[in-house]
């Protein structure tokens, strides 16, 4: 019994971190096939890909520069948000071009009935004016958001999720974000 008490205390403190809005998406609410893309050309999208596909075996597609034509038969898209000047430079695109690509991708997803999940695993280092612009853009049409708690210390995601009435899953670790994503796609 003494060993069980610390485990229960950890679970009791961790559970509120996962669902931070009044409504939660039911288990398995999102459908596959799904694709992961970077919004802001961050390296976090690659981390989410490895977490989802290598560790959790979810089998998501991946295209860091996904466009409308890449949505094909997908039912869901994970938009991993966080601006990276280095990533934008390596891709040879400006912030304005990335905003335009994101708007077009969101428009195509909405037109095709593809569910958008906003994902932010970069923590506070992937926040700033450029990232916030992209986050606001994606959150405006997202059906859910999965956020590493370190990136929401100012409540920015909490406020955006409340405005839209979408569930916000705030996790204590990046690995826990993968677990939440797996639950959202559980079939």
Image: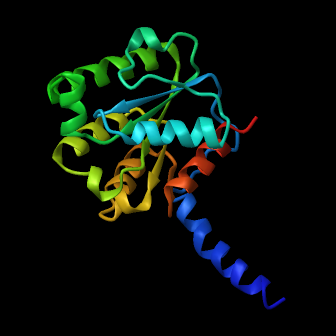
Q: Residue at x 59, y 27 (%)?
A: 60
Q: Position of residue 66 (x, y in %)?
A: 39, 19
Q: Is residue 38 above or below residue 162?
A: above
Instruction: Return the residue nearer the eye: 85 or 151.
Output: 85
User: Vertically, is 146 above or below 123?
Assistant: above
The image quadrant that residue 151 belongs to is bottom left
Instruction: Name the spot of residue 19 as percent of width and height, x first.
Output: 56, 57
Counting from the top left corner in percent of width and height, residue 176 is at: 57, 56
Q: Residue at x 23, y 21 (%)?
A: 100
Q: Is residue 163 left or right of residue 128?
A: right
Which residue is painted at 36% across and 52% down in the image?
A: 157
Locate the C terminus by quadrant.
Answer: top right
Residue sitting nearer the eye, 85 or 130:
85
Give the percent coordinates (x, y) of residue 38.
Answer: 37, 32
Q: Is residue 23 above or below residue 98?
A: below
Which residue is pictured at 25% across the width and 40% down the height?
83
The reply, left or right, for residue 96 in relation to residue 27 is left
Q: Residue furthest right?
A: 1
User: In what quadrant of the picture does the N terminus appear?
Assistant: bottom right
Q: Is residue 177 above or below residue 53?
A: below
């Amino acid at each position: 019994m003494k060993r069980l008490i610390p485990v229960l205390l950890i679970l009791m403190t961790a559970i509120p971190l996962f669902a931070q809005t009044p409504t939660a998406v039911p288990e398995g609410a999102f459908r596959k096939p799904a694709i992961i893309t970077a919004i802001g050309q961050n390296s976090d999208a690659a981390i989410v890909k490895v977490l989802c596909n290598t560790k959790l075996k979810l089998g998501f597609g991946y295209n860091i520069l996904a466009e409308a034509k890449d949505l094909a038969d997908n039912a869901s898209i994970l938009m991993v948000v966080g601006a990276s000047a280095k990533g934008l430079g390596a891709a040879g695109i400006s912030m304005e071009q990335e905003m335009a690509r994101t708007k077009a991708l969101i428009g195509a997803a909405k037109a095709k009935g593809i569910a958008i999940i906003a994902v932010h695993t970069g923590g506070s280092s992937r926040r700033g004016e450029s990232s916030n612009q992209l986050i606001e853009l994606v959150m405006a049409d997202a059906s859910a958001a999965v956020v590493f708690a370190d990136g929401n210390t100012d409540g920015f995601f909490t406020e955006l999720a409340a405005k839209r009435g979408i569930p916000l899953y705030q996790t204590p670790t990046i690995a826990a974000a993968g677990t939440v994503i797996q639950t959202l796609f559980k079939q």
